[in-house]
Image (spheres, rainbow, N blue to C red):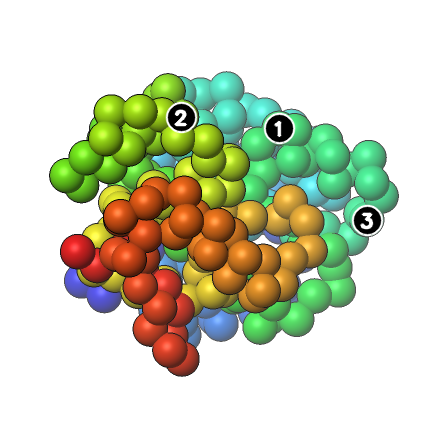
Amino acid sequence: MSEKVKILVVDDEESLCEILQFNLEIEGYHVDVAYSAEQALQMDLEKYSLILLDIMMGQMNGLKMAREIKRNRQTAHIPIIFCTAKESEEDTVTGLNIGADDYIAKPFSVREVIARVKSVLRRCEVKNQTSEVSKICYETLCIEIEKKCCTLNGKEIDLTKKELEILILFMKNKEKIFSREEILDCIWNNEITVFDRTVDVNITRLRKKIGQYGKFIVTKIGYGYGFRA
């Protein structure tokens, strides 16, 4: 990659920080570490694309640090993955309500962390791309992003939230083929446990609802789906 994605690991376990830093750097990321929330908040956080954050730390815990990050307009957009030994439902809900993008309970495998990091970064990339436009059209098929509506030949069509989000993903990235895993990551996030078949069912319904444009949602056998005009 021409410019390495920057990740900050914040944890008071120095050995764990070293392990995560080493393995994430092997994956091609630039990784910095901080051993406390206080130390991390003294750093230039705006340059990071993602923060891996422990909850149980010193005077300021990870939840308090996350609140500080999300209150600051310059850093509020940075995705956060909590890595912590705390596993209660209350902690999970609190973290997600603050704005965390994912939650990994210790002990975890390095492979799991890497997979979660890639998934969150991929979702954020697609989200950022989509937020750059307010309207996406192909001929008479149009999506108004802010209004959350889709029109066909000037008439609004009834799409579910997931169907609309899939169509936005495809039309914003015309000609790109997305695997089922990528679609699940981008659209379903961590809401529920879903399966590949869920993607297939939603795309079958979507094709029917967008009339003559359904044929442009193509299936690439062995790879996935995309919008090709």
Disc nearer the start of the sequence (1/2): 1
Disc nearer the start of the sequence (1/3): 3
- Residue 213: x and y in percent read 26, 48
When the figure is inspected, residue 211 is found, relative to residue 66, above or below; the finding is below
Q: Which kind of residue does numbered mark 1 sit on?
A: Ile
**Quadrant in which the N terminus is drawn:** bottom left
Location of mark 2 (residue): 148
Q: Mark 1 and mark 3 in contact? Answer it, CB < 8 Å.
A: no
Q: Residue at x 62, y 28 (%)?
A: 98
- Residue 104: x and y in percent read 67, 54
Location of mark 3 (residue): 87
Q: Nearer the viewer, residue 111 or 129?
A: 129
Within 10 Å of disc 3 (Cα), the crowding (few <14, some 14-19, many 20+) is: few
Q: Residue at x 44, y 21 (%)?
A: 72
Q: Nearer the viewer, residue 36 or 117?
A: 117
Q: Residue at x 19, y 35 (%)?
A: 140
Location of mark 1 (residue): 98
- Residue 172: x and y in percent read 25, 45
Where, by quadrant of the figure, is residue 153 drawn? top left
- The span from disc 3 to disc 2 (Cα, nearest Å) is 35 Å
Residue 75 in view, yes or no = no
